[in-house]
Image (cartoon, rainbow, N blue to C red):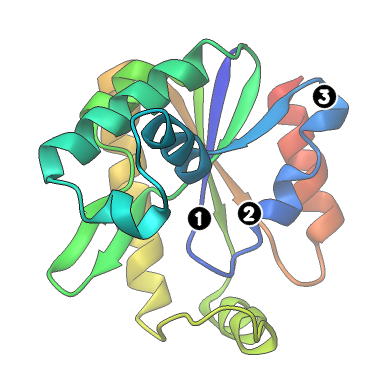
Amino acid sequence: MGVVVVTGVPGVGKSTVMAGASEAGYGNVNFGDMMFEVAQTEGVADRDQMRKLPIVEQQRLQRLAGERIAAMGDVVVDTHASIRTAQGFMPGLPEWTLRAMAPAIIVLVEATPAEIAGRRAKDATRQRDDGNVALHQEVNRAFAAAGAVMVGATVAIIENHDSGVDAAVAQFRELLA
C-alpha cells in the first residue's frame, strides 16, 4: 500500500494505536526523527539548531525527509496534522511534504477531550498545553481533508477511547490489510 500517515493531538494515543503496524508488515517512522536525520547529513548537530534554520531550509528538509520516507515502501509515519502555535495552527503536513510522501491513507486518531486531558495529566514526562482539544481535532480534520484532496489519499478516523484501545488497534490493523 505504501505510506500511511498517522496523526492526532498530543496525548491521544497515536503510538499505542500504531503498535499494530509491525504485525501488518509495516515499519514505523517518526517524521521529526527522519527530518533530523536528513539535517544531520548537512551538519546540523541537534533539533534545536534545526528549528533555528531559515524557514526555506526547514521546508527543504521536510521535502527531503518526505522523499526518504516514500522510498521506504510500506511504512507508517507518526506526525501531526497541525501544530498549535502562538500565531494559530500551523500545518504539520504542508503541501511539499505530502506530495513527497504521497500517502495512501491519512489516519486521524481521536478521543474525547476529557480522555485526552486525563492522559496528559498522567504523563509527567511531557509538558503539553491545555488548549481547546476539540478545536484542535477539528483543525486536524480540516487539514487532513485538504491534504487528502491534494494527493488523492483517503482519510480514516480511529477513535481511541480509554475503554477501547484494543478496538482502535484492531481498526488500524484492518486499514493496513
Q: Residue at x 86, y 54 (%)?
A: 166
Q: Quadrant of residue 164?
A: bottom right
The quarter in which the C terminus is drawn is top right
Residue 152 appears anywhere in the view: no
Spatial separation of the CA atoms under disc 3 and disc 2: 16 Å
Q: Which residue is drawn at 24% across and 25% down?
A: 96
* Circles 2, 1 touching at the beta carbon (< 8 Å): yes
Describe residue 1's horizontal placement relative to residue 24 as left or right.
left
Secondary structure of the residue carrying numbered label 1? loop
Residue, disc 3? 24
Q: Is residue 3 depicted above or below 38 in this figure?
A: above
55 and 113: which is toward the camera: 55
Spatial separation of the CA atoms under disc 1 and disc 3: 21 Å
Crowdedness near tag 2: few (<14), some (14–19) or many (≥20) residues, C-alpha within 10 Å: many
Q: Residue 60 carries which label?
A: none
Q: Quadrant of residue 126?
A: bottom right
Amino acid at circle 2: Lys
Secondary structure of the residue carrying numbered label 3? helix
Q: Earlier in the sequence, mark 3 or mark 2?
A: 2
Residue 40 appears anywhere in the view: yes
Residue, disc 1? 8
Q: Is residue 29 depicted above or below 166 in this figure?
A: above
The number of discs equals 3
Residue 77, percent from left and from top: 56, 35
39 and 148: which is toward the camera: 39
Spatial separation of the CA atoms under disc 2 and disc 1: 6 Å
Amino acid at circle 3: Ala
Q: Which of marks 1 and 3 is nearer the N terminus?
A: 1
Residue 59, percent from left and from top: 21, 35
Amino acid at circle 1: Gly
Q: Which residue is drawn at 48% across and 34% down?
A: 37
Residue, disc 2? 14
